[in-house]
Image: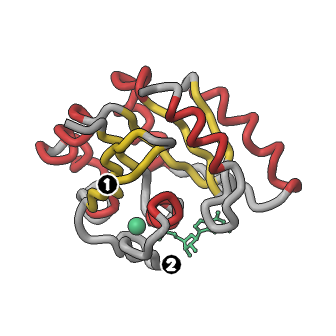
Amino acid sequence: KLPVIVIIGRPNVGKSTLFNRLIRKRRAITDPTPGVTRDPIPERWLLGNHPVTLVDSGGIKIEREGLDDLVSEKSYSLLEKSDVILFMMDCTEVTAEDREIMERLRVYADKVVLVVNKIDDVNRSDLIWEYYSYGFQRIVGISAAHGHGIEDLEETLLGML
Ligand code: GDP
Ligand code: MG
């Protein structure tokens, strides 16, 4: 069984954009409308030369039906059985939904990478520091849209396999 890496986060933080960039395809739908990805999309991905399964969790009901569903059977088991959880946030805003997801991720903290997205340019690079207060050990700032920080992210992931 391949290691499973799942991308989670509230709608619109850029999960599908990152997923597409990593697998270098246009498989997941990205859309400015929150919740547009329908189902969890698993895709085989070569991390360095390690084959893994990358999952865009967009459609698990975290997005569409709110936070209660993060503890629903389906999403719970997805977190449970994942080897790495990429928890994405948006450097331009932290919402109540982000905080609730974070609380539910505490038990998995040792396999979480907090990915701070939309660090598009140097003006935004300082924004990453406040994210250290949330208590996750691994934090990587990226711009999924522009491709910044992707190598750092891959290196962090390689260190976790
Ligand atoms: P998802 O709902 O978490 O899957 O988010 P999407 O990948 O669909 O992206 C939501 C919106 O954020 C889209 O309009 C993307 O183009 C935009 N977006 C994604 N990554 C970035 C980024 O690095 N910088 C900026 N400025 N926008 C981004
Ligand atoms: Mg999506």
Task: Tell me if residue 120 comes above or below residue 129 in the rendering.
Answer: below
User: Which corner quadrant of the figure contains ligand 2?
Assistant: bottom left
Q: Amino acid at mark 2?
A: Pro
As drawn, is 136 to the left or to the right of 31?
right
* Circle 2 Cα neighbour tier, 10 Å, few/some/many (<14 / 14–19 / ≥20): few
Q: Which SS class for mark 1? A: strand
As drawn, is 39 to the left or to the right of 84?
left
Task: Tell me if residue 33 comes above or below residue 104 in the rendering.
Answer: below
Q: Where is residue 132, by image quadrant?
A: top right
Q: Amino acid at mark 1?
A: Arg
Q: Look at the numbered disc 1 and say if its residue's Cβ is closer than 8 Å to ligand 2.
A: no
State which quarter of the image contains the C terminus: top left
- Label 1 or label 2, whichever lies nearer to me, is 1
Task: Tell me if residue 1 comes above or below residue 55 in the rendering.
Answer: above
Q: Residue 32 shows which numbered tag?
A: 2
Q: Where is residue 63, by image quadrant?
A: bottom left
Q: Look at the numbered disc 2 and say if its residue's Cβ is closer than 8 Å to ligand 1.
A: yes
Residue 97: image location, x then y, percent = 44, 50
Residue 15: image location, x then y, percent = 46, 59
Q: Which residue is mark 1?
A: 44
Residue under the image location 46 percent in, 44 percent down: 47
Residue 87: image location, x then y, percent = 46, 43
Residue under the image location 11 percent in, 43 percent down: 73
As drawn, is 121 to the left or to the right of 139?
right
